[in-house]
Amino acid sequence: MIKTDIILGIDPGTQLMGFALLRIHNGQPQVILMDVLKLTKEKDIYARLDMIHSKVCELIQLYKPGSFAIEAPFFGKNVQSMLKLGRAQGVAIAAAMQAKILVTEYSPKKVKQSITGNGNADKDQVWKMLQRVLHIEEKPQYFDATDALAVALCHHYQSSSVTGKTVKGLKGWDDFIAKNPGRVKKQG
């Protein structure tokens, strides 16, 4: 049986919002789209929030994702920035909830750990691993787009992992390998 799912990944922001769509076809991730929504031309914060909500709704309507993954804001020293980022994240989540899509949040550290094996990896290390795993040639102009793609791939890894809650019926490593041949790397 062929199984396909689409994951919408979001890197929330009030200047740039990264977004990415990842198709999971028979367990193999394939990039559909990764880009950013530029919000800097609009000075009014509420107009920016409306733009975020509209863009997420548009992506959901066009691509019909089955999953929505978003990066949780990290705690910073600037309270005003944190409030603005929380609002941006909130309207993106509201759009997904309105469409009845399950929302999952991941901390930046969890995303980096899932992609590179190092929770303290920098953005360039994450990008290089995404390039390798997803066979991407061209580097996007903004890391916000690659961050969104990393969130989507992290969600795929977390929801299909042996310890993940959504995987059922695995009977040990041999069964995992049989059901996930693309996740196994052979050493020469």
Image (tube, rainbow, N blue to C red):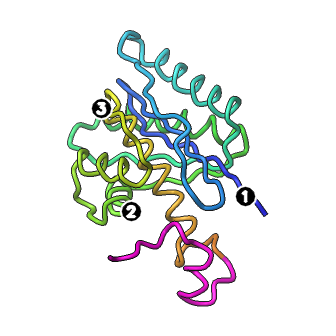
User: Residue 80, labelled with which disc?
Assistant: 3
User: Horizontal placement of 116 versus 158: left or right?
Assistant: left
Q: Residues within 10 Å of mark 3 (few under 14, many from 20)?
A: few
Give the SS element for disc 1. loop
Q: Does dot 3 land on a helix, a strand or a loop?
A: helix
3 or 2: mark nearer the eye: 2
Find residue 102 and name its label: none
- The amino acid at mark 1 is Lys
Q: Is residue 185 magenta?
A: yes
Question: In the image, which is nearer the foreground, mark 2 or mark 1?
Answer: 1
Q: Which residues are magenta?
A: 168-188
Between disc 3 and disc 1, whose residue precedes? 1
Marks 2 and 1, Cα distance to the nearest angstrom? 23 Å
Q: Is residue 170 left or right of residue 10?
A: right
Mark earlier in primary sequence (3, 2): 3
Amino acid at the residue labelled 3: Gln
In the rendered image, residue 123 lying in the magenta stretch gets the answer no
Q: Nearer the viewer, residue 86 or 70?
A: 70
Give the quarter of the image for residue 172: bottom right
Q: At 67% across and 78% down in the image, what residue appears?
A: 168
Q: Which mark is residue 3?
A: 1
Q: Quadrant of the C terminus?
A: bottom left
- Residue at disc 2, secondary structure: helix
The three-letter code of the residue at mark 2 reads: Ser
Rate crowding at label 1 as few (under 14), some (14 to 19) or many (20 or more) other CA atoms within 10 Å.
few
The crowd level at tag 2 (other Cα within 10 Å; few <14, some 14-19, many 20+) is: many
- Number of marks in picture: 3
Q: In this view of the protein, which residue sits in the foreground, 170 or 54?
A: 170
Give the number of the mark in front: 3 or 1.
Answer: 1
Disc 2 target residue: 114
Distance of mark 3 from mark 2, alpha carbons? 30 Å
Q: Quadrant of residue 22?
A: top right
